[in-house]
C-alpha cells in the first residue's frame, strides 16, 4: 500500500537545480536526487532531500534504469524530472519503463534531438534554415547542390554550440564524416544563416505558454564557444516588433512539439537577408550561462521554482498559476577569466544587481527600467571585460556546467 507521501526523483549530471529541489520540499513533497559520484559533495540543499544517491559516470541507460529500479524497491516515485539536458532521454526511458506520467522517449526527442525538432517545426509551418540528415550520401550531395554554402555540421543531441563545425565546401564535409565514422548519423547539416540570435525562455502549462521573456545575444553563442570572447545577452525591448514577433512565435512553437507542462529555452535567428525569424532549437530545460538568474532579475520569475510548482501541482491535480511578474530589463556580461577569482569591484554602476561567482569566470548582471540603459551598460562592460579579464581556451568537447 502507498504511504501517502509524494516523491519526485530528480536526475542531474551537473550541479544545478537547487531551487527546484527546495521548492518541491517547501510544497510538502519529498525530492530525491540522483547525480554522479564526483558531485556527491557539491553544493546541494541536503537539508531538503529525502535521499542523495550517486552513480559512476558513463553508465549505460540500462544500468541507470537498473539503479533506479533498485531504488524504487524501498520507495515509490510519483514523478521523474531531468534537471539537466543530458538526462532528458534517460528520464524519458525511465518514465516509460516504470509507467510514470510525463514525456516519453518520442516526445522528448522533439526537445532534445535537433533533427527531430527541426522536422517537427517545419511540418508545423515554422521557418527553419534548410537542413539535411547525415545518413544517405546521395541526399547530402543533392542538398549541397541545391542549398548554397557555407553549412553547419551539427551534433543532433549536444547542448549549446558544442561540436558544431562550419563547412565551407563539400570536400570538407567528406573529410569530417570520415573522422566521425559510425558516429556521423548522429549529426545533421544545416544552412549557415547570418543573423542576430535571440532566446526565449518560457513556462508551458497544460499545453499553453503562460510566461515568456525574450532576450538577444550579443555575439552568437557558437562564435563565443569556438572563437572565444565575452558572452552577453539582454532583454528585448518590450512592445517592439522583435518582442511581439518572438513571443507570438514561441507561444505557437513551444507547445506544438508536444509539451504539456514544463520550461523551455528556445533560440531563434533573425536573418540578415530577409529580416524574418527562423527557428534554431528548443530544449525542455532552464537555460544555462546564468540565464535563469537573468530572467529572475528582469521579471522576478524563478524558472526553477516555477517548474517545481508545475510538477507538484500536476501530481496533485491542482491548477498551476504562474507567479506575478514585473517588466524590467536586464543584461548579463560573462567571460572566461585569466585569474581564478577575478575582481569586478571596479564596476560600480548602481544598476549592477548580481556579481557572478564561478571559478575562472567574470560576470555581472545589470537591471534597469530602461532597455537603452541596459544595452549601454552591456556594450560598455563587454569591451572592458575583454580588456581586463578575458582568457581563451579551445571549445570543450563536453559541457562544463
Image (spheres, helix red, strand yellow):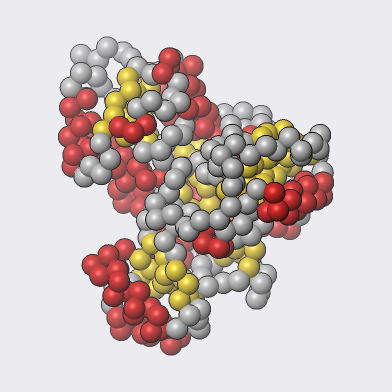
Q: Position of residue 97 (x, y in %)?
A: 21, 38
Quarter of the rendering occupied by the N terminus: top left
> Residue at the spot x=31%, y=39% of the render?
91
Q: In this image, 315 relative to 27: left or right?
A: left
Note whether residue 243 is visible: no
**Above or below: residue 90 compared with residue 111:** above
Q: How many marks?
A: 0
**Above or below: residue 163 compared with residue 176:** above
> Residue at the spot x=60%, y=71% of the render?
194
Q: Quadrant of residue 397?
A: bottom left
Note whether residue 183 is visible: yes
Q: Position of residue 113 (x, y in %)?
A: 37, 56
Q: Quadrant of residue 28?
A: top left
> Residue at the spot x=41%, y=38% of the render?
14
Query: Which residue is farthest bottom?
Result: 145
Along the line of sight, the residue nearer the viewer: 255 or 349: 349
Amino acid at each position: 500500500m502507498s504511504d501517502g507521501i509524494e516523491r519526485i526523483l530528480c536526475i542531474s549530471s551537473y550541479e544545478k537545480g537547487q531551487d527546484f529541489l527546495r521548492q518541491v520540499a517547501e510544497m510538502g513533497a519529498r525530492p530525491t536526487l540522483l547525480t554522479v559520484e564526483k558531485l556527491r559533495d557539491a553544493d546541494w540543499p541536503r537539508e531538503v532531500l529525502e535521499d542523495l544517491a550517486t552513480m559512476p559516470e558513463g553508465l549505460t541507460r540500462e544500468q541507470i534504469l537498473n539503479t533506479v529500479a533498485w531504488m524504487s524497491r524501498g520507495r515509490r516515485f510519483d514523478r521523474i524530472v531531468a534537471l539537466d539536458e543530458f538526462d532528458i532521454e534517460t528520464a524519458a526511458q525511465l518514465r516509460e519503463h516504470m509507467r510514470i506520467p510525463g514525456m516519453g522517449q518520442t516526445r522528448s526527442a522533439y526537445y532534445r534531438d535537433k533533427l527531430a525538432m527541426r522536422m517537427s517545426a517545419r511540418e508545423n509551418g515554422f521557418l527553419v534554415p534548410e537542413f539535411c540528415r547525415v545518413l544517405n550520401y546521395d541526399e547530402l550531395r543533392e542538398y549541397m547542390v541545391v542549398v548554397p554554402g557555407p553549412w553547419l555540421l551539427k551534433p543532433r543531441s549536444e547542448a549549446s554550440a558544442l561540436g558544431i563545425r562550419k563547412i565551407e565546401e563539400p570536400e570538407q564535409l567528406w573529410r569530417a564524416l570520415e573522422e566521425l565514422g559510425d558516429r556521423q548519423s548522429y549529426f545533421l547539416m544545416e544552412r549557415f544563416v547570418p543573423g542576430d540570435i535571440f532566446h526565449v525562455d518560457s513556462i508551458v502549462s497544460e499545453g499553453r505558454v503562460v510566461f515568456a521573456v525574450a532576450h538577444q545575444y550579443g555575439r552568437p553563442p557558437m562564435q563565443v564557444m569556438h572563437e572565444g570572447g565575452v558572452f552577453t545577452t539582454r532583454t528585448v525591448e518590450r512592445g517592439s516588433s522583435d518582442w511581439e514577433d518572438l513571443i507570438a512565435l514561441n507561444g505557437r512553437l513551444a507547445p506544438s512539439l508536444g509539451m504539456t507542462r514544463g520550461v523551455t529555452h528556445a533560440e531563434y535567428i533573425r536573418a540578415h537577408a530577409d529580416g524574418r525569424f527562423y527557428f534554431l532549437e528548443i530544449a525542455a530545460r532552464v537555460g544555462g550561462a546564468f540565464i535563469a538568474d537573468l530572467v529572475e532579475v528582469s521579471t522576478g520569475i524563478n524558472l526553477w521554482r516555477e517548474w517545481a510548482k508545475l510538477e507538484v501541482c500536476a501530481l496533485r491535480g491542482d491548477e498551476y498559476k504562474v507567479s506575478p511578474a514585473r517588466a524590467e530589463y536586464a543584461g548579463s556580461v560573462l567571460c572566461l577569466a585569466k585569474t581564478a577569482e577575478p575582481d569586478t569591484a571596479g564596476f560600480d554602476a548602481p544598476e549592477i544587481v548580481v556579481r557572478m561567482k564561478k571559478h575562472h569566470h567574470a560576470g555581472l548582471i545589470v537591471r534597469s527600467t530602461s532597455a537603452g540603459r541596459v544595452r549601454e551598460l552591456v556594450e560598455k562592460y563587454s569591451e572592458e571585460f575583454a580588456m581586463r579579464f578575458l582568457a581563451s581556451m579551445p571549445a570543450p568537447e563536453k559541457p562544463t556546467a
